[in-house]
Image (spheres, rainbow, N blue to C red):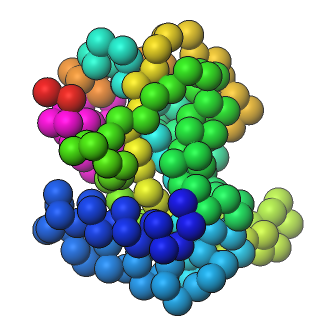
Amino acid sequence: MYRYELVQTLQRYLVLYPHEEPTVTRIVELVEQHPDCFERTCRPGHITGAAWVVSADHRHMALVHHRKLDRWLQPGGHADGDGDVVNVAWREATEELGLSRLLVVETGGSLVPLDVDVHDIPPRYDADGQLVEDAHQHHDIRFLFVASDRSLEVSDESHDVQWFDEQQLRELTAEQSVLRLMEKALQWLS
């Protein structure tokens, strides 16, 4: 998706989730004001893509134990110039989970994100205390995917990858954005 298409997609999302207007507005403003919004160098933040991956029977969700953040999260990452955010989410899911056959889930016959989120990324420093990356924001566009197989592979970006059912996930994390993704996916797939 390019900037115009992303704004249109976010407007369709807003129809489903009107209470999320403040977050959607922040993302739309970034996209409209920054032609380089798909580049990781864009400040105050940039567009990222993420995937919520469920098993074919819709009973399990695949998460990665993120190496840098040391917590269980959905796969996702930087667009690095790719304006097709669905492709970014698919690429990150395949790289981080080792899955290759993923089908994006549409709703109402159109492509709509499962969730959107804007979150702060703290500054990063090297071992000598030198700033490597300044603080910024990720404007995350998250899509729902169904995996046709369940064989996961750990990437160099994570400590582990696993499938979790709903109860296991609730016991695993209190991370609100992860639980929100699970709740929305359960609603979409019911």
Looking at the image, which residue is at 33% across and 18% down? 60
- The magenta stretch is 170-188
**Residue 181: within the magenta?**
yes
Q: Is residue 83 left or right of residue 140?
A: right
Q: How many marks?
A: 0
Q: Is residue 67 left or right of residue 140?
A: right
Looking at the image, which residue is at 52% across and 89% down? 33
Q: Is residue 149 left or right of residue 166?
A: right
Q: Is residue 19 visible?
A: yes
Q: Position of residue 4 (x, y in %)?
A: 48, 74
Q: Position of residue 19 (x, y in %)?
A: 14, 68
Q: Position of residue 69 (x, y in %)?
A: 56, 47
* 90 vs 118, nearest the viewer: 90
Relative to 17, say whether 34 is above or below. below
Residue found at the far right of this picture: 128
* 58 vs 5, nearest the viewer: 5
Q: What secondary structure predominates along the stretch shown in magenta?
A: helix
Locate the C terminus by quadrant: top left
Looking at the image, which residue is at 20% across and 36% down? 188
Looking at the image, which residue is at 22% across and 74% down? 21
Residue 183 in which image quadrant: top left
Locate the N terminus by quadrant: bottom right
Relative to 164, say whether 180 is above or below. below
